[in-house]
Amino acid sequence: MSFTAAFRVPVRRAVFSTSFRRAATEVRANSFRKFSTEVPPPAPKSNTALYAGLGAIAFGGVAYYLYTSSSDTAKEASTTVKSAAQTAKVATKFTPTKADYQKVYNRIAEVIDDASDYDDGSYGPVLLRLAWHASGTYDKNTGTGGSNYATMRFEPEALHGANAGLHVARGLMEKVKKEFDWISYGDLWTLAGVCAVQEMAGPKIPWRPGRIDGFVTHVTPDGRLPDATQGAPHIRDIFYRMGFNDQEIVALSGAHALGRCHVDRSGFQGPWTFSPTTFTNDYFKLLFNEKWVWRSWNGPKQLEDKKTRSLMMLPTDYVLTQDKSFQKYAKAYAEDNELFFKDFASAFSRLLELGVPTQQFVAAEPWIMGDEA
Ligand code: HEM
């Protein structure tokens, strides 16, 4: 058995019946009238949608300018964007319901699993990383960045060093977008993150749609995502800027139970846990229960477990055992999987909503997807 195959763990299906999935696949996107938050399509018989589309584009630019300069006018402007988008929806006579988003979720779940030749047999981890990087650019002081505008579609951001390798995830979602072209990229990518966590046996992540697609002008500067070679002050700078506290930083870091580092993407190499396609608190357990030593190799500084030398930790992961405040939470999560699941779900749900004006969301409270009950 190859090293990679040894890590392959069957993805646990918690909730879905195959019949439900099949039903979802059978409903083809072309049976829907189109709705795109990016550029609302012109209506064949009426000009309403065209005007709405042009309005959305015009107001989108203005809204961004105002959004970054004055909060009162920003509210007004983003409401205008919202109403333009809603007018477009009405004009196209298609307003997606929770059931429509569930169909997208089901399709993403199939894509995640269709990965027999990729990494550990799942696209879940790389999709989760896409959702996180699309959201983690948020700056609470300027209100810029976050998941709203799906700006990683544009080259400046796609080429940011931290996003290396995420073309794989964006490419996978492009196929889903073709099938469900009414969904915005921001909603699609964040829903993929939710689906990845849940389909890899993690907690339910409250999520709701409402993100709109933006423009290249919404791209934020490089350097907003964490640098794995740094220490606690850097981690705090980055996550405090998004509005998170120490407990949330540690909870979110537990996502490294999943996936692996790739030399050709980040320069680092290897998985954090023995089951990189199953969401558990193993990351925290291993951090404390294994002896970690610096790996001697021709690559960036990373740690390896002394016993098997097959697992890795980034310098920023190891800091969670060294910094007093981080350590307190990391230990609590190592000892209590339920607590970790609860705290991760709440922090990750909030992460996915960063940068999205509340009035843009279609529901007052987030939904639980993947729940057939
Ligand atoms: C201090 C904070 C963080 C740092 C420095 C960091 C750094 C990294 C690096 C260097 C990689 C390897 C990329 C590659 O080579 O493919 C990675 C992968 C990953 N990260 Fe993080 N990360 C952080 C926080 C997070 C958070 C908050 C999440 C999600 C909530 C997350 C989810 C993931 C996942 C799932 C992977 C695996 C991707 C794959 O297998 O393709 N990370 N991270």
Image: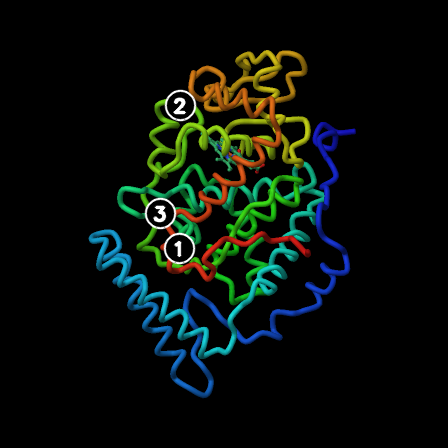
Q: Residue furthest right?
A: 1
Q: Label 1 crowding class (10 Å Cα cut-off): few <14, some 14-19, many 20+? A: many
Residue type indicated by callout 1: Tyr
Quote the CA–CA distance across marks 1 and 2: 28 Å
Residue type indicated by callout 2: Gln
- Which residue is depicted at the point 20% across and 52% down? 69
Quadrant of the drawing holding the C terminus: bottom right
Which one is in front in this view, the residue at disc 3 or the one at disc 2?
3
Residue type indicated by callout 3: Gly
Q: Is residue 327 left or right of residue 237?
A: right
Disc with the residue nearer the chain's start (3 vs 2): 3
Q: Position of residue 138 (x, y in %)?
A: 36, 43
Disc with the residue nearer the chain's start (1 vs 2): 1
Determine the secondary structure under disc 1: loop
Q: Compare residues 240 and 169 and report the one nearer the observer.
A: 240
Q: Label 3 crowding class (10 Å Cα cut-off): few <14, some 14-19, many 20+? A: many
Against 215, residue 43 (above or below) is: below
Q: Which residue is mark 3?
A: 145
Q: Number of labelled discs?
A: 3
Q: Compare residues 366 and 242 and report the one nearer the observer.
A: 366
Determine the secondary structure under disc 2: loop
Q: Is residue 68 left or right of residue 155?
A: left
Q: Compare residues 166 and 256 and report the one nearer the observer.
A: 256
Against 224, residue 94 (above or below) is: below
Numbered badge on residue 25: none
Quote the CA–CA distance across marks 3 and 1: 8 Å
Q: Which residue is mark 2?
A: 230
Numbered badge on residue 149: 1
Q: Are marks 3 and 2 in contact (CB under 8 Å)?
A: no
Quadrant of the drawing holding the N terminus: top right
